[in-house]
Image (spheres, rainbow, N blue to C red):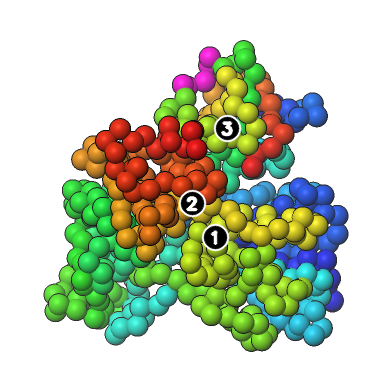
Amino acid sequence: MPKVIYQSPDGARTEIDAPVGATVRNLALANGVDGIVGECGGELMCASCHVYVDEQFLERLPPVQEEEDEMLESTACERLSNSRLSCQIKMTDELDGLLVRLPEEQL
Amino acid sequence: MLRHGAVVIVGAGQAGLQTAVSLRSAGFERSVVLIGAEPGLPYEHPPLSKALLAGTAQPKDVALRPESYFDSHEVELLAGERVVAVERDMRRVLLESGAAVRYEHLVLATGAVNRRLECPGCELDGVLSLRTLAQALELRERLLDAERVAIVGAGFIGLEVAAVARAMGKQVDVFELAELPMGRVVSEPTARFFARAHRREGVHLHFNSGVRRIVGDGGRARAVETSDGDTVLADVVLVAIGIVPDDELAAVAGLPVAGGVRVDQRLLTPDPAISAIGDCARFPSPFADRPVILESVQNACDQGRAVAARVSGDDRAYTAVPWFWSDQGQLRLQIAGLTVGAQDAVVIGDPEQGRFSALCFAGGRLLGVESVGRPGDHVAARKLLARRASLSPEQARRADFDLKAYARAA
């Protein structure tokens, strides 16, 4: 099973087994990883599941669609070139070892 | 056994759970007790009328937190426990099971119950309501077997379910007393757009039409009889005619209620040891000219956060910008602000293409924006409203008006 690694702003890492198809947002909530809020339920109505994706994985992700792009304009922490909403990242075998850094704030 | 919580939260919906979560993330170290009338873990509500009903999400997908969260964060969850009384002089709540829980601060997050349809036949088997996870699962089961679905009420829930049922290939009839759908909450251009869209998908919309009686056969619903005297066959009848805030505990405890528990802008009742939040609370909003109840995930969560912040020492008025959404088939309606009472709606974009926003004004002031297929307008509207930036209908009517650019410059 692929793994996803969450890195909190203080550098602490949490590694989670990620069933293929599960989203990075849902995995965080289901495993009690703090730092992802995901208030709207993964519906692209808020930007509180913002993550910074490690550069080496960026190209393996599906491109940002319009709704995600617009929502990323309202993140609590600065949007960077590797910003994504984790509700839009579904785990695949190719994403094994995916490292996402969590922002200081989500709201 | 006498339990005790520094903070006791009655109601384990989105507002109640958020209060507990925010207390812990703010570093609140004292005891937190969360009491929910339903069994099981607190869950997300939006999927109940969308993905869960469509079968693309399962009950396990909608839990807001895993069971382990409550242990690891020391939130005592009493699920399946009904609170029957608040004894303010003793600062405790009584549970149906006979136990008492003492509080230092009490948060009422009791939510709402669905308004009942009072007509002959309303007790028949197959007449359903949708608010809880259990009700959503029952509705899903019934829809699978049904051929014809009647929905009473063309609000968000009614229309979301209509779209799901239609996508399942059912014959769908929707009965609405008003002349437009979602009339209580959206402007006329938006309401008309959605009426057209649902009709195009084959939903039968009946406006200015109430249900006089539900006709049964062997105890099961078989048809609805409308106020016009028509009889329309239905195997399932969903009643979706709005909610009644659950303010009974507060009322019996002598707290002021007026269609919801009355609270001030800090979400406090006149008893400084009791707050009320979410679907049960009527509060003064800077976005409305009278106290309102806002039934939304945003409001539930933001109010939970606000109360948790106050209890943790960060005391300020609740002023969050309201936002909502509704997924109806392939269409998504996004609303920022409160557009009820708009006198003027300026439409930008192209409703024919399914991409437009209705900018709603009253007295020359922007109340809110309803968007379909224009998520950028929605995000821009939230920012404008948060900054209380001014925008006039005249500005919005200019041919080259661009809401996103305007919000950036504001």
Q: Are marks 3 and 1 on the same chain?
A: no
Q: Badges 2 and 1: C-beta atoms under 8 Å apart?
A: no
Q: Which mark is residue B286?
A: 1
Location of the N terminus of chain A by quadrant is: top right
What span is colored magenta in the figure? A59-63
**Image point (48%, 67%), residue name:** B289
The three-letter amino acid code for the residue at tag 3 is: Ser
Closest to the camera, between mark 3 and mark 1, is 1
**Image point (72%, 40%), residue name:** A34
Q: Which mark is residue A86?
A: 3
Give the CA separation, mark 2 to mark 1.
14 Å
**Image point (61%, 50%), residue name:** B64
Chain identifier of the residue bearing label 1 in the image? B
Residue B243 percent across, percent down from the top left: 45, 71
In this view of the protein, which residue sits in the foreground, B406 or B57?
Answer: B406
Q: Which mark is residue B323?
A: 2
Where residue B127 sits, quadrant-wise, is bottom left
